Every structure is written in C-alpha cells, then in structure tokens.
Image (cartoon, rainbow, N blue to C red):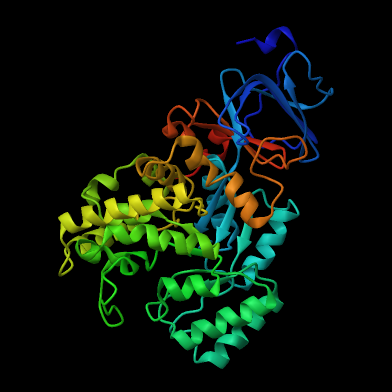
Amino acid sequence: MKSPFSLLALLFVSSVALADTTAIVNVNVITMTSDTVLAGQTVVIEDGIITAIGDVDAVAVSEGATLVDGTDRYLMPGLTEMHAHVTSTADAQIRRLSSLFLANGVTTVRGMVGRPSHLKLREDIAAGRIFGPRLITSGPSFNGNSVNGADHAASMVREQQAAGYDFLKIHPGLSREEFDAIADTANELGIPFAGHVPVAVGIAGALNKGMATIDHLDGYMASLLPSNTDTSGGYGGFFGVMLADQVIEGRIAEVVAATLAAGVANVPTESLFEHVVNDVAPADLATRFEMRYVPEATVRQWQDAKERTLSERGFDPLVAAQAIDIRRKLILALHEAGASLLLGSDAPQIFNVPGFSLHHELRFLVAAGLTPYAALQTGTSAPARFFGLNTGTVEVGRIGDLVLLDANPLINIDNSRRVHGVLLAGRWATAAALLDGLD
C-alpha cells in the first residue's frame, strides 16, 4: 500500500475534531454499494457531506483540513442500532451512552421507548449541540397498562403524532381491538408503528395492518405451530423459546412469504435472545470485556435474569437450542427471500452493552448464514433506505457518518468491532478518546 507520508504530513487527532473539512487519507473504502474494496483512496468530507473519493495521489485536500491516516485501515458507513433505549436524558448518561455507541461505530440510534425529553434530545443532537448518534425516537409505549380501550388508543396515537414523535412503540398486552385502533389511526395519520406483536393479534394480524418493524421476531415462533394450535392462553416463555419442539419448520417459507408480501421489516435482536437462553453460563457472560462499562449491580441483575430464565418451570436446554436453530433458519429465509432485515440488539438490556452488543448481533447474523457483507447491509444501507436518510453508503453527496476500522469486516465479521475512530457528519473522534474516562 502507498505511504501517505510522501504526499503530505498528517495531523493525528486524539479527540473530537471540529474542522469544517476532514480527509481520511490512503484508506481502503468499503462503499456498501457492493462487496468490493476500493484501495488507496482519500475521502474528503466538507461541512458534513462527502465531497470527494478518489486515488490518494489524485485527490487534493485543502489546507487546514483535519487529516486522518487511513493506511491499512478500512472506511465504511456508520452503523445503525435499530433497537435501543435512552435510559436517561441526564447530561452524564447521554455522554456515556453517546460515547459507547460512537466508539463502536454506531452513528444512528432508534430509541424504542421515548418520552417528551427525548424530543429535545433529538433536536440537540441534530443541531450539533450534543455530539452523539442521530436519534430517531418513539413516543411512550402502547401496552396493556397504558391503553384503556380502542378510543383511548386512537387518542394516544393522535397525541403522539402531534407531539412530533417519529413512530409509535407497541408492547404486549393490547387487545385486538386496541391494536387495530392504533394501527388504523396511525396509518391514517402516516406515523409508523413498530415493536412487539401482542398475543391477541399474532403475526398475521400484525402483517395485515402494516407494522413498520416487528422486533425480536416476536410472534414468529407461535406462527410456526400447527394451524389448529390455540396460543391465546398459552405461555411459550421468552419469545416462544419453549414452543420450539412443537414447531413445523416447513411453515417457515409460508410466514416468510407473507412477511415479504406485507413489506414488513424485522429487527431480530438475536443477540438478546441467544444471550438469555443459550448454554453460556451467566458468570462467563459477566466477565466479557465490555462489562467494565456497566455498573456491577446491573451486571448482577443481568446474571439473575438469565438464571431465572434457565431455571423457569418448563425450560429445557435442548428445546432452547432448537429455538436458536429455528430462529437462525427464519433469519436466513427472510434474507434469502428479500424481506427486510434491520440490525438491532436491544441495548442496554441483558448482557447487551450499548454499541458492543451490535457487533455480537452481526456475528449472530453471520452464524445464521448471512455473508459479512449482507450482515453489514442490515446496519448500513438497509436502515438508510428504511428511514429515507442520506447515509448508509460511502458515496459523494452522502452525509459523512463513517467508521474507520483497523481490519476488514468483509473477511471476518468480528473485525467490525475493531473501531479506530468515527465520523459523525464529518466530525472525527477516536474510539480511544471516546472511551477514555468511562468506567
């Protein structure tokens, strides 16, 4: 590879750089428009927009630009976390969450349980007053406790749409009438609704009403049971884990075809599911590197939560292994059929540390059969299309939300976690600087 030092002296920055122009010099570019790599490129971002991509010997960089050495590194679009939670809008917590996400290459976050303070947070981030991943937020949850009848449900939809939330969050416990009122009113007003599939609704009902996303593959396990099975009063455990030995795998193609026809996207959050039900000991999960960024009390709560699941009456490790296998087959079938898959892990949640958990999710998608490129699409170009954002690929004219990696993730998906630094609308920060001081 060419050495950039024969061309110009590079300025190395160890914290957030605020120059209007940033250039990543002599870098390998993963455009995410194809699974090829453009070697020896210089990428220039001016006022937040990519203005030039070309051979390192041919692209001029203006004097005073922030220069980042890309030698032997890989530049790709920033990742989108499609299922996250803003746990607090206190300044310290926002700095902490932002640092964890950005240090892992996450430049956009979809917050799944919003509240009024998140609207201001969204605007502060968009205006650049807070250096954090772009926020797309739901309103407060629609669930069996917050909703009191169909009329109330419709009224809540109108209130949240008028308040300016980006979408509605659906939780369990809704009656069919309440869900239909939410869906019909939301479709009338043009505000998306997403999240869980209430038991009273089922996958068919959710697809029929046009949910924007189904998260956690909620309801799919029950949809694969024999057609005469009554699941209205049953209990299948954590996202149907206990139902796996009753599933007819031949029905996967049928439900996948229905999902594709409905145009509904899925956010599997496979890392959440597998971390909770797999055979990895809670104590082993608690010793992972990223747990240093989580309070010890929270890690203990996560251990307790997994132990409760594993000791729950009716839980069988062999059936849980079947459930993991079935979910992976479903994920692969959705992908191969062309149904939209979007990257999300549900963080912070049981053993899912913000930012870090998204790389576990990528690994699980590859374990399900997706190529590294296809897995990365679920967190880059796919969510950009889903939201209609000018991000998701490395092309001239796109917003400069980018991540610089120390190794090629197309060869090994685990290289996605080797983040050297991140650009948010062209503002550069190293991963080390973002994590420095966090405990």
Q: In the rendered image, is residue 216 in sight?
A: no
Q: Position of residue 327 (x, y in %)?
A: 33, 55
Q: Position of residue 323 (x, y in %)?
A: 26, 57
User: Is residue 53 found left or right of 311 in the rendered image?
Assistant: right
Q: Determine the residue located farthest toward the right in the rendered image.
A: 63
Q: Nearer the viewer, residue 42 or 265?
A: 265
Q: Position of residue 395 (x, y in %)?
A: 71, 35
Q: Which quarter of the image is occupied by the C terminus?
A: top left
User: Is residue 117 found left or right of 417 in the rendered image?
Assistant: right
Q: Nearer the viewer, residue 60 or 392?
A: 392
- Vertical placement of residue 93 versus 397, above or below: below
- Vertical placement of residue 182 versus 293, above or below: below
**Quadrant location of residue 238?**
bottom left
Q: How many marks?
A: 0
Q: Nearer the viewer, residue 202 or 61?
A: 202
Q: Which quarter of the image is occupied by the N terminus?
A: top right
Q: Position of residue 308 (x, y in %)?
A: 22, 64
Q: Residue at x 36, y 44 (%)?
A: 368
Q: Residue at x 57, y 54 (%)?
A: 109
User: Is residue 173 found left or right of 178 in the rendered image?
Assistant: left
**Quadrant location of residue 284?**
top left
Q: In the rendered image, is residue 157 in sight?
A: yes
Q: Residue at x 40, y 63 (%)?
A: 255
- Vertical placement of residue 22 versus 54, above or below: below
Q: Residue at x 37, y 46 (%)?
A: 291
